[in-house]
Image (spheres, rainbow, N blue to C red):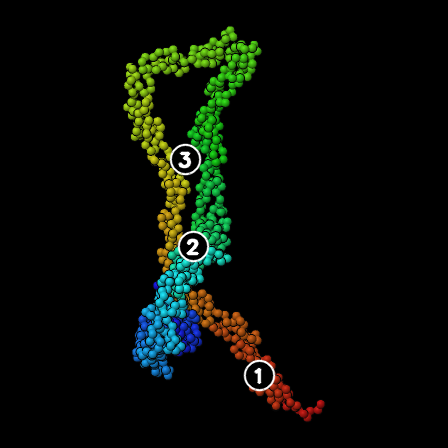
């Protein structure tokens, strides 16, 4: 709920005790003026921002104003004091809206009274129109304007002020209190009213927020409609209460004057709309292509590399399986081939001869098994078909007999009974004598013979060519309850009880399970004229007499051994594999804890793993750094510094190398001049100079004239390891030591 405004105030010029030069949100030079609003219990600083952008509670006194500082303390205006700035420096609170003012640089204070009042604390009212007539009635306050006889009415809430349209605050304001929402202003003309809405709102009572996003102002972004309202926009709207503006699972966090999105790890951006490029810091090996995903990435390996990071050489690359699938261990470099059906061998390049192994079990009814690459085929004899030649062919389908001839199916053959006027194996030939053909031994069927151009049929057959079979039981009457059956191949008949019954009148049902025909624990179920054995797992056959060999075609992969059991073939896998067919490779290293780039090695039983540490590390998981400095590897006074997984030596002057073993060759730079010979030392060198030179680097030519070897006033000229004397007239010799005989002629 908005607090009523008491008055606008101006603070300034600021002095050193009141406002610091810079206060965070903004800055102004000393002496700048600031302004704000005094509420019942708050002071709100408004732009230009010099104070903190916050609201501080103070005393209820509307005249006391506290200014917030960065140190969190409240400081009073010069005319107020006290912990809550509620004590006037004028001694007593100035009455009748008097203002306490300071004099002489805050030395003395007094009340400055409004027009119409006097006294030390403005407690005395002067004779004025407001005092004499009280023109504003019971619903307003009389305020003098200009002199003691001019006034204006300051009306109470709900009553119209003279300055607007009334005279004495005696007319009700038609604007209901708090009628306009969102800081809208109610405007009255005395009889009617309407709301003036702030920007962003509309409606008779400013109750509707205008969605500025309807005009699509954001050209290349997502528009988010926001709401701010209140007299000074001091009321924050929680944008997160509406539809979540944050996308891709981002969490909306309401802020003062806005919101922000706390994105999931996979997204970023103001509204979490940007998928983070996880390939920026990818660990794909060199040559691999990083494919960015949502919250992760995938390494696309080049040919010959495998692994989630393409960090391994593909052991199958150089040893391909021709007719199977290669399973490789990138850590050991070993690979094995799981062959397709019909192939074997280390590289699945050897064809299995199924006919040699299981020929009779594969092709039935005398068919011939023919081996082919990776499989086999059955060549069926005439009369049977199917993959295993176990389906009898219907010789009369489609009908081979022409001209309405009747086809009689025979084993691996057929016979045609021709209509009148036709003859031949398929009734394709017309009779030469018209409607009837002269019979021949080949034209009479089913054992009939030709006699006088007529077929004499064997017992049980009839028809022109004996093609129709008679039912011998049609002329046989059996006792009550019995049925007639034809004896196979004899054309004779017998009267017997129906299947499943016995007794004189065939009324007793036979219990076929009475002889316990089911073997190996099979359960017998009696049926009419038959029985059924429900075999336990691992057995088959009419009487459960057959042991099912589940290992006939070995289901075990990766060198697993098949053990036949009652229910199925059980695969005993090698330690490196598991699964009902040994189809899965154990990889105890898939979630290993090996640290510091150690190599994970599976144990022999593939139930655990060990960590093969890199130099400089130890521990079960290579998690411990070895302090190589304990062994004092640095020689010649070098200082050892242990590093993560290694060490380094800080060598003294004159030594170098990993362990400070190598003496630095100070002669390498050829410091000796003038063909001097350099002799290396530790952090030093010594030059053996050629005759005539001296100095540390033989750079100094020895002055052979220093000892004045030239006599008799001769001039000495220095050379390299020598000198020359320039003798004066009358002297000669190396050192001008010979006095020439000037008296000698010539």
Disc 2 to disc 1, C-alpha distance? 95 Å
- The residue furthest top is 452
Residue 144 vertical placement versus 278 (above, below): below
User: Where is residue 147 shown, x and y percent of the image?
Assistant: 39, 78
Which element carries disc 2, helix, strand or loop? loop
Label 2: few (<14), some or many (≥20) within 10 Å?
A: some
Disc 1 to disc 3, C-alpha distance? 109 Å
The residue at which mark 3 appears reads as 553
Closer to the camera in the image, 493 or 714: 493
The residue at which mark 1 appears reads as 704
Which circle's residue, 2 or 1, is located before the other in the chain?
2
User: Where is residue 487 shown, x and y percent of the image?
Assistant: 38, 15
Q: Quadrant of the N terminus?
A: bottom left
Disc 3 to disc 2, C-alpha distance? 56 Å
Label 1: few (<14), some or many (≥20) within 10 Å?
A: some
User: Which label was assigned to residue 247?
Assistant: 2
Find out whether the residues at labels 1 and 3 contact each other: C-beta distance under 8 Å. Answer: no
Which circle's residue, 1 or 3, is located before the other in the chain?
3
In front: mark 1 or mark 3?
3
Q: What residue is drawn where x is 32% and y is 72%?
A: 61
Which element carries disc 3, helix, strand or loop? loop
Closer to the camera in the image, 150 or 97: 150
Residue 607 vertical placement versus 160 (above, below): above
Q: Is residue 693 left or right of residue 631?
A: right
Q: Is residue 450 left or right of residue 181?
A: right
**Residue 474 quadrant:** top left
User: Where is residue 172 shown, x and y percent of the image?
Assistant: 36, 64
Which circle's residue, 3 or 2, is located before the other in the chain?
2
């Amino acid at each position: 709920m908005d607090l009523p405004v008491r008055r606008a105030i101006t603070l300034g010029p600021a002095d050193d005790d009141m406002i610091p030069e810079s206060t965070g949100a903004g800055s102004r030079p000393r002496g700048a003026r600031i302004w704000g609003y005094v509420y019942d219990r708050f002071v709100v600083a408004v732009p230009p921002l010099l104070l903190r952008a916050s609201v501080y509670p103070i005393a209820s006194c509307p005249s006391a104003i506290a200014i917030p500082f960065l140190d969190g303390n409240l400081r009073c205006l010069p005319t107020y004091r006290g912990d809550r700035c509620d004590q006037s420096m004028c001694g007593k609170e100035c009455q009748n809206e008097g203002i306490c003012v300071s004099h002489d640089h805050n030395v003395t204070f007094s009340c400055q009274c409004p027009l119409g009042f006097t006294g030390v604390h403005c407690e005395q009212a002067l004779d004025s129109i407001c005092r004499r007539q009280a023109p504003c009635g019971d619903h307003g306050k009389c305020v003098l304007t200009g002199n003691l006889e001019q006034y204006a009415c300051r009306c109470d809430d709900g009553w119209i002020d003279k300055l607007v349209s009334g005279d004495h605050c005696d007319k009700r304001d038609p604007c209901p209190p708090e009628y306009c929402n969102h800081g809208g202003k109610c405007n009255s003309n005395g009889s009617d009213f309407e709301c003036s809405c702030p920007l962003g709102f509309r409606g008779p009572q400013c109750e509707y927020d205008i969605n500025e996003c309807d005009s699509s102002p954001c050209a290349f972004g997502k528009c988010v409609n926001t709401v701010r309202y209140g007299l000074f926009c001091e009321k924050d709207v929680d944008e997160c209460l509406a539809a979540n503006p944050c996308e891709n699972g981002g969490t909306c966090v309401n802020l003062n004057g806005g919101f922000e999105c706390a994105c999931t790890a996979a997204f970023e951006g103001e509204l979490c709309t940007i998928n983070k490029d996880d390939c920026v810091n990818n660990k794909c090996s060199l040559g691999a292509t990083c494919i960015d995903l949502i919250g992760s990435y995938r390494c696309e390996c080049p040919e010959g590399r495998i692994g989630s990071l393409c960090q391994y050489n593909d052991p199958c690359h150089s040893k391909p399986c021709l007719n199977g699938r290669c399973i490789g261990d990138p850590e050991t470099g070993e690979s094995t081939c799981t062959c397709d059906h019909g192939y074997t061998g280390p590289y699945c390049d050897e064809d299995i001869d199924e006919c040699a192994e299981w020929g009779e079990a594969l092709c039935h009814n005398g068919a011939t098994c023919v081996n082919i690459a990776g499989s086999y085929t059955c060549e069926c004899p005439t009369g049977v078909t199917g993959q295993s030649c176990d389906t009898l062919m219907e010789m009369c389908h489609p009908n081979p007999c022409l001209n309405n001839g009747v086809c009689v199916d025979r084993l691996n053959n057929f016979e045609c009974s021709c209509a009148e006027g036709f003859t031949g194996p398929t009734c394709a030939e017309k009779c030469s004598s018209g409607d009837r053909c002269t019979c021949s031994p080949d034209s009479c069927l089913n054992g009939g013979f030709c006699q006088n151009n007529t077929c004499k049929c064997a017992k049980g057959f009839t028809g022109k060519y004996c093609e129709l079979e008679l039912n011998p039981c049609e002329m046989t009457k059996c006792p009550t309850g019995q049925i007639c059956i034809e004896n196979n191949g004899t054309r004779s008949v017998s009267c017997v009880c129906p299947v499943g019954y016995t007794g004189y009148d065939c009324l007793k049902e036979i219990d076929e399970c009475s002889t316990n025909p089911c073997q190996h624990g099979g359960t017998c179920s009696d049926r009419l004229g038959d029985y059924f054995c429900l075999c336990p797992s691992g057995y088959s056959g009419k009487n459960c007499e057959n042991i099912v060999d589940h290992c006939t075609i070995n289901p075990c992969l990766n060198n697993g051994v098949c053990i036949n059991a009652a229910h199925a073939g059980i695969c005993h896998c090698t330690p490196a594999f598991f699964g009902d067919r040994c189809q899965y490779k154990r990889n105890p290293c898939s979630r290993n804890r090996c640290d510091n780039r150690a190599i994970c090695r599976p144990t022999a039983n593939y139930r655990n793993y060990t960590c093969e540490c890199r130099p400089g590390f130890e521990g079960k998981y290579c998690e411990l750094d070895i302090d190589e400095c304990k062994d004092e590897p640095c020689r010649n006074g070098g200082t050892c510094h242990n590093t993560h997984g290694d060490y380094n030596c800080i060598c003294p002057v004159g030594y170098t190398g990993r362990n400070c073993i190598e003496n630095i060759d100070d002669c390498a730079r050829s410091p000796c001049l003038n063909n001097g010979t350099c002799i290396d030392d530790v952090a030093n060198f010594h030059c053996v100079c050629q005759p005539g030179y001296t100095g540390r680097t033989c750079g100094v030519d020895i002055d052979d004239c220093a000892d004045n070897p030239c006599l008799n006033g001769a001039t000495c000229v220095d050379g390299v390891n020598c000198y020359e004397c320039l003798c004066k007239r009358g002297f000669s010799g190396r050192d001008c030591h010979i006095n020439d005989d000037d008296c000698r002629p010539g």
